[in-house]
């Protein structure tokens, strides 16, 4: 999560290999979390006894996820492009740490009644779940890396380039999330079976919350290094 500083020239912008790998990695991490949708997709597949149902339901889940992540990515990029790099990193540091602590300390988790939803309800559920778990905010360190400083935007088209990079980051993230969620759902449906859910359940919500804190500390370290 030191993308914001290491290996990136001041004022430069764009999606490089490090940003792509980080975006994919966060997408994979999101995708393996059953709370982010693959459990819903698996439920559809089991009810209809069809792998295609898993894929179809997953498409709606990814659509809702992207509807939450993409606007956040664009807003973060716009903010980072209009203020100094130091201020942007400071704000992102505080946001990541505070949100991570809220996720760690909150007594209840977001829940949805029922497992049988219409496609648009599935997308809406995914949008809400992605929003309340800060899926877009988690991309902030990557977006700081892909966004040039305000001086960089004196050049015509630079802001458009940064926003284009934000779109790429969000799409790559969604692709990673879809791949991981689909792979896990199909693996459980086809090979592993439901028994593993009763014997090997891991609370990834807590891991996700800790990841926010670690990301915040990483950006803070880069921020202090910048100063």
Image (cartoon, rainbow, N blue to C red):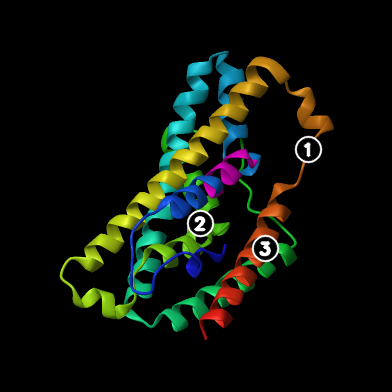
Find disc 2 in the rendering and name its residue. 131
Instruction: Count numbered badges in the picture.
Output: 3
Is the residue 226 above or below the residue 39 in the image? below
Can you tell which mark lies on residue 201? 1
Is 104 on the left-hand or right-hand side of 70?
right
Tell me residue 14's x, y (percent). Answer: 33, 59
Q: Is residue 100 magenta?
A: no
Tell me residue 159's x, y (percent). Answer: 25, 68
Is 147 on the left-hand or right-hand side of 190?
left
Crowd tier of the residue under label 2, counting other residues whose Cα lies within 10 Å: few below 14, some 14–19, many 20 or above: some
Q: Which residues are magenta?
A: 26-33
Residue depicted at 47% across the width and 60% down the height: 142
For the residue pair 20 and 9, the one nearer the viewer reads as 9
For the residue pair 114 and 96, the one nearer the viewer reads as 96
User: Which quadrant of the structure image shows residue 41?
Assistant: top right
Can you tell which mark lies on residue 103? 3
User: Which quadrant of the structure image shows residue 106?
Assistant: bottom right
Residue depicted at 41% across the width and 47% down the height: 66
Q: Is residue 32 magenta?
A: yes
Residue depicted at 48% across the width and 18% down the height: 52
């Amino acid at each position: 999560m030191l993308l914001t500083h290491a290996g990136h020239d001041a004022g430069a912008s764009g999606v490089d290999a490090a940003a792509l790998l980080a975006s994919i990695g966060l997408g994979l991490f999101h995708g393996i979390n059953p709370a982010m949708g693959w459990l819903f997709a698996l439920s559809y597949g089991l009810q209809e006894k069809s792998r295609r149902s898993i894929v179809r339901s997953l498409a709606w889940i990814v659509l809702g996820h992207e509807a939450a992540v993409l606007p956040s990515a664009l807003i973060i990029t716009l903010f980072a492009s209009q203020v100094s790099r130091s201020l942007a990193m400071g704000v992102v540091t505080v946001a990541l740490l505070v949100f991570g602590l809220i996720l760690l300390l909150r007594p209840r988790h977001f829940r949805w009644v029922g497992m049988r939803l219409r496609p648009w309800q599935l997308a809406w559920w995914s949008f809400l779940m992605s929003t309340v778990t800060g899926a877009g905010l988690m991309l902030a360190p990557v977006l700081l890396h892909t966004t040039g400083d305000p001086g960089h935007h004196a050049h015509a088209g630079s802001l458009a380039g940064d926003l284009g990079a934000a779109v790429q980051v969000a799409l790559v993230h969604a692709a990673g999330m879809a791949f991981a969620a689909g792979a896990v759902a199909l693996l459980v449906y086809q090979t592993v079976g439901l028994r593993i859910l009763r014997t090997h359940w891991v609370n990834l919500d807590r891991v996700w919350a800790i990841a926010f804190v670690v990301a915040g500390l990483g950006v803070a370290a880069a921020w202090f290094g910048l100063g």
